[in-house]
Amino acid sequence: MRNVVVTGGTRGLGIAIARKLAADGYRAIAVARQQNDHFAACVQQAEATAPGSLRFAAFDLNDIAFIPKFVASLSEEFGPLHGLVNNAGLGTSGILATLADPQIERLLRLNVTSPITLTKYAVRAMMVGGAGGRIVNISSVVASTGYSGLSVYAASKAALAGFTRSLAREIGPLGITVNCVAPGFVDTDMTGGMKPAQRAQIIRRSALRRLPDAKDVAAAVAFLVSDAAGNVTGTTVTVDAGNTA
């Protein structure tokens, strides 16, 4: 059973990704500060069909200095790492002129510095294993389209897209692929506070006249993690029901 780490894996997109990977035969290791009842129920369901396929690892990704030890502990407990899905992130919104400096720093720390550092040590672990690997970064369509009130968030997601392209060239010779998935506005906790008028406007703009589901994003991630995507690297897969078409 190949190990894939999914950050922010106990809620929203993360839990959808972890469940899909577990269903596809991987051991999905969900990383978050703590578990919740919904995740615990998902683990019970997974145990009934594929014991050990959905696991939890407690860690606060803001503790960047402890990431090296955390990755080492994952390898010790579960064995070699096959994949890393950098999904955890903050979606803090606000006009830049009034956004508090600590909020900006916190968002960039969790959305940029943390996944880059985690990827560094995950890649080292993959290099030791010698069997290649998969890195999937969760970006967003706002990285390229922009959205009022999300300038800092958009900057962080654009950073991940650039990181993806360069790292793909850097570690491609090692057999490790690096890709992005850029969801549009998906039905998750992060979009739950959106006003009905905003939601309706986004749906009208979409070619398919609907919002994508978290399962759609999870399916894209699962493809990029799979053997079928062995020759796909340095690219971004957009899942937005045609909103940016």
Image (cartoon, rainbow, N blue to C red):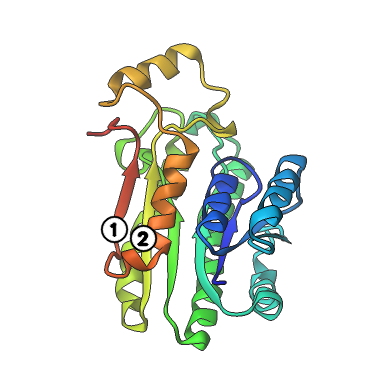
Q: Which percent across, then down, holds residue 31?
A: 66, 58
Q: Which percent across, then down, holds residue 116?
A: 50, 65
Residue 90 visible here: yes
Q: Is residue 78 above or below residue 11?
A: below
Tell me if 24 is positioned left or right of 35 in this view: left
Residue 225 numbered tag: none
Work out which quarter of the rendered image holds the N terminus and state it. bottom right
Q: Is residue 232 above or below residue 35?
A: below
Q: Which percent across, then down, holds residue 106?
A: 61, 48
The residue singled out by tag 1 in the image is: 235
Determine the secondary structure under disc 2. Answer: strand
The answer to whether mark 2 and mark 1 are in CB contact below 8 A is yes
Residue at horizontal 68 percent and vertical 64 percent from the top:
52
* Foreground of the two, 78 or 26: 26
The residue singled out by tag 2 in the image is: 179
Q: Is residue 130 above or below residue 190?
A: below
Mark 2–mark 1 Cα distance, whole angstroms, equals 5 Å
Residue at horizontal 36 percent and vertical 60 percent from the top:
179
Work out which quarter of the rendered image holds the C terminus and state it. top left
Q: Residue furthest left?
A: 245
Type of the residue with mark 2:
Asn
* Crowd band around label 1 with a 10 angstrom C-alpha radius: few (<14), some (14–19), many (20+): some
Type of the residue with mark 1:
Thr
Residue 158 visible here: no
Q: Which percent across, then down, holds residue 75?
A: 64, 78
